[in-house]
Image: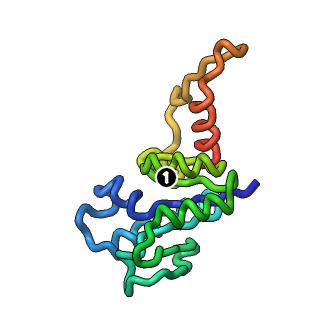
Amino acid sequence: MPVTLIVDGYNLTNARPDLFGAGADLEQSRDDLLSLLARYKKKKGMSVTVVFDGANAPGHEARRTSEKGISVIYSRLGQSADSVIRDLCRTLREKALVVSSDRALCRDAAGFGAACVDSDEFLDRAMESIYADMAPPEEGDEPSRRDKKGPAHREKKARRRHGRALEKL
């Protein structure tokens, strides 16, 4: 089942100012984010949509564009990016994977059947995925894993749901 990655744009850029420029020009931060997401999309082959608050958009008008192969949506004046993301989740349901650190937004997305990943966690995984081919893994770098057997050793439901969301990345 194809998954659409829905990114809360300013939430992601503000999560890592070291990566997207602390206090930098908004346009440059957006461009840096789109460059990173374009590389991630090329690597993973999934559809990516980024939603930005329209109050910070050029001309303050709602618009949809495509930049670097990424679908970009600016909410209209007076409408938050969160409400646009909720509408997308309502439409896509379990085919949506939301990237945001906004707990209320993630809770609402989960209510529609969408999965949600924290911005920092996504950035860590995206960078790892993009640059995985550059450095060969060292010996003994395999993650340790306990063999779990039976329902008594089953992870909690919320943790399993979160794990499934991460598998989509």
Tell me if 7 is positioned left or right of 150 in this view. left
- Say which of 4 and 76 sits in front: 76
Q: Quadrant of the N terminus?
A: bottom right
Label 1: state its secondary structure.
helix
- Say which of 74 and 136 sits in front: 74
Residue extending farthest bottom:
59
Question: Residue at left 68%, top 55%?
Answer: 93
Tell me if 12 is positioned left or right of 126 in this view. left
Quadrant of the rendered image containing residue 49: bottom right
Q: Is residue 163 above or below residue 155?
A: below
Question: Residue at left 53%, top 75%?
Answer: 68
Residue 117 coordinates in the image, percent (x, y):
52, 47
- Say which of 24 and 97 sits in front: 97
Let me know if residue 134 appears in the view. no
Question: Residue at left 41%, top 70%?
Answer: 53
Residue 153 coordinates in the image, percent (x, y):
64, 15
- Say which of 164 and 131 sits in front: 164
Let me know if residue 28 appears in the view. yes
Three-letter amino acid code of the residue under disc 1: Leu
Packing grade of label 1 (10 A; few <14, some 14-19, many >=20) is some
Quadrant of the rendered image containing residue 46: bottom right
Identify the residue under disc 1: 105
